[in-house]
Amino acid sequence: MPEALRLRIIGRLRTPFADKFGVPRQARLVDLPGTLEMIPPFDQIGWFDGLEEISHVWITFLFHQAVEQGWKGRVRPPRLGGNRRLGVFATRSPFRPNHLGLSVLRLRRIEHESGRRVKLLLSGVDMVDGTPVVDIKPYIPYADAVANARGGFASDAPEPRLEVRFTTGAQARAEELAVPAEVLEAMARLLALDPRPAYAAGGDDGKEYGMSLYQWNFRWQVFDSRRLALVVAIEPFSPQRQERPTSGSDFSPT
């Protein structure tokens, strides 16, 4: 058995997130849609026969933006404020030996054109746009849902930390740009969870942050003393999205 294995990239995810800042820290925290575009030769509809009966799927993907930074045996989980180190295998850090991620997403439907160019329409994504996918498996409730399991430092889902409001100017700009109401609602849910690292939260009053969602860039101010996130500006944003690959790609974790 060789010490190094070669993984095949079977598809790429299209998501609303051009950058990692603001991406939910776990899948399904915010019910945002994404599309998994399969890459030839893995885009034959026959290879998905039966999957339409499944409500959720395991997606194994690559933290491709972390590959060049290597891996670390001990990491500082953002949820612990960056003040405590844990072993990488006790966390979901992207700085893993093989940079593999694993998320359960809801499968909304499967689309294809003449039996090829298969797309899985998903929801609850927690990946940046262009994320490479290396495997798909059905979520099996009786085997995968473990009653009374312990989650350590992340046993409970994060609660909303901030109230979110939009200034009159931001609301007017949203109307001018025809930003859909569901996008504004999704942005509010993301900000309520506070995308700042835990070590950065708690001392900001008036500091401004920004992130992109779909083709819009949002800027907001945080007032920790009032537990408030105030969206102050919305502008068009055109991220450099990766082209859909036309042939299979390889990823070597070594």
Image (cartoon, rainbow, N blue to C red):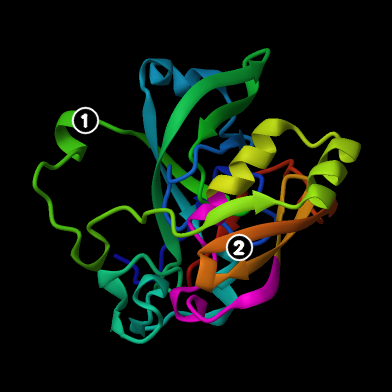
Under tag 1, what secondary structure?
A: helix
**Circle 2 residues within 10 Å: few <14, some 14–19, many ≥20:** some
The structure residue drawn at horizontal position 27% and vertical position 71%, both measured from the top left corner, is: 89
Residue at (43% x, 31% y) in the render: 106
Residue sitting at the far right = 176
Viewer-nearest of labels 2 and 1? 2
Residue 240, position as x, y percentages in the image: 81, 56
For residue 13, which quarter of the picture? top right
Work out whether residue 35 or residue 31 is closer to the camera in this orientation and state it.
31
Residue type pointed to by label 2 = Lys
Q: Is residue 57 left or right of residue 192?
A: left
Query: Residue 103 colored magenta?
Result: no
| Residue that badge 2 annotates | 20
For the point 63% across and 19% down, the residue is: 112
Q: Report the span colored magenta.
A: 190-209
In the figure, 218 relative to 32: above or below? Answer: below
Q: Which residue is mark 1?
A: 141
Measured Cα–Cα span from mark 2 to mark 1: 30 Å
* Secondary element at image label 2: loop
Q: Is residue 191 magenta?
A: yes
